[in-house]
Image (spheres, rainbow, N blue to C red):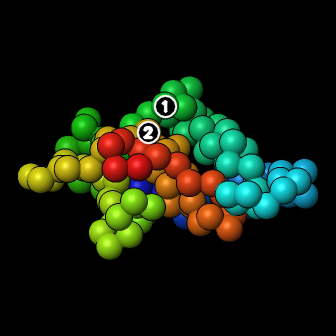
Amino acid sequence: MLGRLRMSTKEALEQYRIIAGQIFSAKNRKWFMGDGAFKATTLEQEVKRVVAARMGRNENERMLDIPNQSGMGAAFVCTLSAIDMAHLRCFRTYKTRDNANANCEIWEAARATTAAPTFFKRIAIGEEG
C-alpha cells in the first residue's frame, strides 16, 4: 500500500484496520478448517476495493508500475511458493534487468503474501503457483 498505491503511513494503517476487521471477523470464519480458517475471497474483495479506490476504479491494476520512471514508491513484496519453498518469489513495482517475476495484479500479490495456510488458502500466480 505504501509503495505501489502511494499511500501515506496513516492512510495505509487505516486501510489495514478496516481490512483486518472484515477478514478476521466471526462472520468471515470458515465453518470447517480446511485450507485456512478464514475466507480468502473476503480478503481479495477488500484489497480490490482499496486498489480500485486508489487507482481510478481499476481493481485489476498490475504490480509493475511502468509510468513511474522516477523510482518514487518503488517497492516489492516477497513470498514463498508452495511448490518451491527454497526460493523466494518477488513481485516488484519496477523493472529489473532480469525481471523473471510474474507481473501479477496488486490484489494477487497481497493474497500471496498473506497465504499462511492457517489463515487463508493458497493462491497460484503465474506458472510457479
Spot occupied by residue 90 in the image (x, y as percentages of width and height) = 32, 59
Disc 2 + disc 1, Cβ < 8 Å: yes
Residue type at the position of mark 2: Glu
Residue positioned most to the bottom: 86
Asked if one can make out residue 87 in the rendered structure from this viewpoint, the answer is: yes
- Disc count in the image? 2
Badge 2 marks a residue whose secondary structure is: loop
Q: Is residue 121 positioned above or below 65 on the image?
A: below
> Which residue is painted at 41% across and 55% down in the image?
3
Disc 2 crowd rating (10 Å Cα; few below 14, some 14-19, many 20+) is some
Q: Which residue is mark 2?
A: 105
- Left or right: 112 as drawn, with respect to 13: left
Which sits earlier in the primary sequence, circle 2 or circle 1?
1
Badge 1 marks a residue whose secondary structure is: loop
Spot occupied by residue 50 in the image (x, y as percentages of width and height) = 61, 42
> Which residue is painted at 68% across and 48% down in the image?
40
- Left or right: 67 as drawn, with respect to 1: left
Spot occupied by residue 82 in the image (x, y as percentages of width and height) = 45, 61
> Which residue is painted at 41% across and 65% down in the image?
80
Disc 1 crowd rating (10 Å Cα; few below 14, some 14-19, many 20+) is some
The image quadrant that residue 45 belongs to is: top right
Q: Which residue is mark 1?
A: 60
> Which residue is painted at 20% across and 50% down in the image?
100
Spot occupied by residue 92 in the image (x, y as percentages of width and height) = 31, 53
Asked if one can make out residue 46 in the rendered structure from this viewpoint, the answer is: no
- Left or right: 85 as drawn, with respect to 16: left
Q: Is residue 113 positioned above or below 52 on the image?
A: below
The Cα atoms of the two marked residues, 2 and 1, are separated by 6 Å
Residue positioned most to the left: 97
* Mark drawn on residue 71: none
Residue type at the position of mark 1: Asn
